[in-house]
Image (cartoon, rainbow, N blue to C red):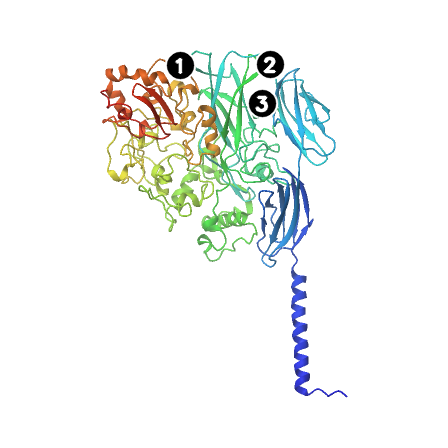
Amino acid sequence: MTRPQSANARVRTNWIFLVLLTLSSVLFAGQASAALTLSPTKVAVPVGGSAAVQISGASGEIQVESKNTAVVKVSLSNLTTTGATLTVHGVSEGRATVYVRDAKTRNISLPVTVTKSMTVSPASLTLAVGATGQLTATGYSGTVSASSSNSGITTVSVSSNVVTVKGVAAGSAVVSVKDDKVTVNVPVTVTTTTASSSWVYRVLATNDLGMHCVDADFSVFSILPPYNVVNAQVVRRASTGKPVVVNDSVVSLRYEAVRDSGGSMNSTSINTSLVNKSNFWQYAPRVYGAALNPGQGLKGLYMPKDAPTLAEHSLSWNTAGGLFKAEGVPILPKDDAGFPNRYPLMRLVATEKATGKDVAYLDVVLPVSEETTCSDCHDTGGVATQRIGIAWSPASDKEIRTRENVLLLHDNMNRTSLMASKPVLCAQCHYSPALDLAGTGAQGDQVGKPTMSSAMHAYHSNKMQGYTDDWIRLGGTPTTQTQACYTCHPGRDTKCLRGAMTETVNCQNCHGTMAAVGGMSPLKAGGSIDGTNDGKPRRPWTDLPRCQSCHTGDAVNYLKLDPSLMASDGLRAIVAFDPTDTAASPRLANNTRFTENSGKLFRFSKGHGGIACEACHNSTHAIWSNPVDTHNDNVAAKELQGHAGTVVECSTCHAPGSLALTLNGPHGMHNVADSRWTTGHENLAKSNVQACAACHGANYRGTVLSRTGATRTWSTEYGTRTVSKGQVVGCYDCHNGPNP
């Protein structure tokens, strides 16, 4: 006989039942609402290959993470409010887990297996008409096959894992080598003959600015397109003769993609199903009025893999500049695997026209960054989106949302209708010399309106509270988070200003404040580059800082300024203008040892032997050497002279031992790394000891101008002496001053 339940017991039982029911409802409801899904749910990719995974049903921000980046790397693209494309990149053989999460789901696991992948060697091939070359596939799966993109240039045949390529006619083609898993594309260049050359060649080349900006999105508005510029010279000498700069009657120059030490290569600008590089070509007809083929730049050049012919990835001879130029290379800051690389390498190859033989090359950085953004202030909720009465952009993509907010604010303040006209080109109304490819000056809607520089720098100059917009004193370099210029320019990650000067100056030490850059004050006498704009507002891209403004002379003849304006060495200034001058007019030096050519900027100037200044010092904003020794910026210097830093080795261009002992080197330098100088400089010093003081100092104990570019070991009558790279050298290092 069972005892009947009391009322309290029944209530308690019902309560427990309801609690359990509620908990189970919550749990099961939680599972049902966890709508974040992946398709497929597991992935296998080869080394160097990629696979796409579709993310759907997301809530809020989507985050992805590889737990072993040595095996697998990941990237996101095609972001929407509820999904995205996750691209899985195989790095090395092995297994790894990728986690995907959103605002509601903590983690979904995606198992990834990376298998061995076929590799093809060499990565590029050059051969003559009628000649053959071989490509060897290793690590392949199944059967190897091959095809040529242009059988009129190259033909192919396959035997097992070896592809034989034959040159049919001069030009460029791509040979695609396939196995059961992947396709590897190898660029092939066919030249006219294989005859040998008796000349020695050197390629000297740099990007012109040290950084090129490009819009991250073109669907709303555009400031700058993909447009990189490379300047190059080719030096030729006989085995013991004097080097001379040659023109396009002697050589031709082309650019080819090359893999950097980190494995990154940038050969194409065309989007694929796995890598979305840019929407520029989608919007170029409406924004720039240019009907471009996919991958074609505004000047007709292509990236190497995209170029239909050799001419469309070659440099042209620029008669006015006396050098080769590739203007408008449409490179983007995302490599072929979809990873960011703002310092991609490009190989410049010189071909001797008389023989058709490739005679020299140099690997240079084509810097490019999409870190030109307005999001710090103009993203919805930012300080520039507080105006009442504007329905700010609800777009899910931060960059698009920010850009739409800029147009909305512009429409509200200036009674324009830009949002209804998007995509728009800012330079359509605000003249920019950077986009004036014909050099005609302000035209049409641009006339009477502020320049692009003024509209940006001058207008925003009083809106930078919380940021550093002033030149800095020694030791006061601001963080990238508080540097005013990096709120819009590349950038906090990119660091446009880099290289040898970054320890002592920021942007404003050379350019002045945003108000000065925007031309809000008239330039002082000598402030304009050619003297024609003195007393007027600064001209953007023309009236710019100069080397001589800080490098005012040598160790015995230089401008002695207030100590607060001088570097720690006491010779060089750290600010390029009089701080009381609101226009930041560049300071002019009396001593011309380090001045640019008259009326020309550093990037247009030439020096020793007609060599471009940038060829030895590297690009503006990226003066050698980069403090990170392995940085791509340093590759070219290492290839030229064996070490990073300013090109100082005479043997870069001259045959070793071919020079007489001299003081006629760049900026009055003597022979460098020449054993004859070690034993033979005494007579020259006795005849003109003041010439030594120009770099070694009035006390002959050495200055910053007499630092060694590399570690040196000298055999002297006083024994062997070794000095480390960067060490200041003086007369007392080996003997008793200038009077042994």
Question: Are circles 2 and 1 on residues that touch, CB within 8 Å?
Answer: no
Q: Which mark is residue 657?
A: 1
Q: Sequence order check: which comes first, mark 3 or mark 1?
A: 3
Question: Are circles 2 and 3 on residues that touch, CB within 8 Å?
Answer: no
Kindly indicate the quadrant of the structure image that contains residue 478: top left
Q: Which mark is residue 311?
A: 3
For the residues labelled 2 and 3, the Cα–Cα distance comes to: 20 Å
One can see residue 435 in this view: no
x, y percentage for residue 354? 55, 12
In the displayed structure image, the side of residue 548 where residue 233 appears, left or right: right
For the residues labelled 2 and 1, the Cα–Cα distance comes to: 30 Å
**Residue beneath disc 2:** 194
Residue at 42% over, 16% down:
654
Residue type at tag 1: Gly
Q: Sequence order check: which comes first, mark 2 or mark 1?
A: 2
Q: Which element carries disc 3, helix, strand or loop?
A: helix
| In the rendered image, the vertical position of residue 86 relative to residue 387, given as above or below | above
Which residue occupies the extreme front position in the image? 719
One can see residue 204 in this view: yes
